[in-house]
Each structure stands twice: as structure tokens, then as C-alpha cells.
Image: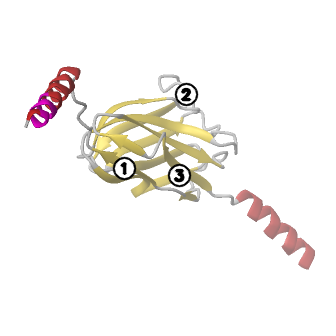
């Protein structure tokens, strides 16, 4: 009986691998006006046929440009669909596989990539989660998922680069000043 219970527990633990969702940026330092690429990846997604969660960020610091690049397939193809839309927390993501086959792999997959423009200086974070986050399987049962990372970025004000004519005038003024000092 102990062997049977142990075998059952082992089988259950293999099936209970939680999905892991990560968020990463293409770099950690930006200037105001730079394009920021945010990538959301998922692992252990084999059982999942639907999900909903938010990409969390400061809407006043980043202007949304576009959503692109998913390993889940073309967002316009049937029988599944990945959608995203602006919300109070950032961007809401939703996925449903109408064929109910599930994503079908435990490999690390890119769920979505986002492009933003940095519009304000400071230190900001990108995260995933939200109060309505849910992952489901073919039987419409909840699937465990964890949100494993928060990506922090530092946005600096764009530094002003002097024009060549301004440098030439400054050099001319220094030469003139040095000439006046020499005569005195």
C-alpha cells in the first residue's frame, strides 16, 4: 500500500508543475525617447488552454508603441487567439485555444513582446500578474502559475549634445581670452 501511495504522489507531483511567467527588458538603462522592448516568456505551459494576466508598468513613464513576436503563433490565425489591450495597470493579455489542444510544450516560449517609448526619467519596473490573473486547462480548471520576475529599468534625461558651431564659438572665445591675457 505504501508503494502505491508513493507512486500516486510521484505521478501527481509530475503533473503539478506550475507554469512560470517571466518579464525581461532588452537592457536596463535607457534615455528619454529610447525604445524599450519588453518580452514576456512562459515555461511549463503544456496544460494551459487559456490565460489572462496583466503586464504591469507606469503608464506615465512609457508610451505603448506595438505588440509583436509570439511563439504562440499568428494572432490572426484560428483556432486560437492572443489579445492585449490597455488597462489601468498597464496592458492586459488574454489567450484562448479554441481547439482546446493546449499550448503543448514545457519549453520556454515567448508569450508576447511589447515596444514602448520611454517618456519620463526615473527608475521603473515591469512586472506580470494582476488581480484577475488566471490560467486554465482543457477542463476549465485552474492551473497553477507563478510570476517569477520583475524587470527594473533606469531612464535618464537625454543629454544635450552641443552643436559644432557652438563648440567653434567657445574655442574662438578661449583663444581671444588667452590673447588678451597675454597682452596684459
Mark 3 and mark 2: Cα distance apart in space: 18 Å
Q: Quadrant of residue 99?
A: top right
Sort mark 1 into few (<14), some (14-19) or many (20+) by Cα contacts within 10 Å.
some
Q: Which residues are magenta?
A: 176-182
Label 3 or label 2, whichever comes before in sequence order? 2
Answer left or right for 11 relative to 159: right
Tag nearer the camera, 1 or 2: 1
Q: Residues within 10 Å of mark 2 (few under 14, many from 20)?
A: few
3 or 1: tag closer to the N-terminus:
3
**Residue found at x 26% / y 50%:** 88
Front disc: 3 or 1: 1
Residue 97 horizontal/vertical position (percent): 55, 36
Residue sitting nearer the eye, 170 or 130:
170
- State the predominant SS element of the stretch in magenta: helix
Image position, residue 165 (x, y; %): 18, 20
- Nearest to the eye among marks 3 and 2: give it: 3
Residue 107 on image: x %, y %: 69, 42
**Near-viewer residue (179 or 86):** 179
Q: Which residue has dot 2 on it?
A: 79
Which dot marks residue 154? Answer: 1
Amino acid at each position: 500500500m505504501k508503494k502505491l501511495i508513493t507512486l500516486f504522489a510521484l505521478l501527481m507531483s509530475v503533473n503539478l508543475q506550475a507554469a512560470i511567467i517571466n518579464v525581461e527588458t532588452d537592457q536596463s538603462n535607457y534615455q528619454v525617447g529610447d525604445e524599450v522592448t519588453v518580452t514576456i516568456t512562459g515555461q511549463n505551459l503544456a496544460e494551459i488552454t487559456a490565460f489572462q494576466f496583466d503586464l504591469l508598468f507606469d503608464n506615465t513613464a512609457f508610451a505603448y508603441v506595438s505588440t509583436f513576436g509570439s511563439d504562440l503563433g499568428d494572432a490572426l490565425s484560428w483556432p486560437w487567439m492572443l489579445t492585449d489591450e490597455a488597462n489601468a495597470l498597464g496592458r492586459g493579455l488574454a489567450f484562448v485555444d479554441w481547439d482546446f489542444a493546449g499550448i503543448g510544450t514545457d519549453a520556454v516560449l515567448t508569450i508576447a513582446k511589447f515596444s514602448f517609448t520611454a517618456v519620463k526619467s526615473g527608475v521603473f519596473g515591469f512586472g506580470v500578474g494582476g488581480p484577475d490573473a488566471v490560467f486554465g486547462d482543457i477542463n476549465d480548471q485552474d492551473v497553477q502559475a507563478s510570476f517569477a520576475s520583475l524587470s527594473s529599468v533606469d531612464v535618464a534625461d537625454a543629454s544635450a549634445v552641443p552643436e559644432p558651431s557652438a563648440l567653434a564659438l567657445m574655442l574662438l572665445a578661449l583663444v581671444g581670452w588667452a590673447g588678451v591675457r597675454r597682452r596684459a
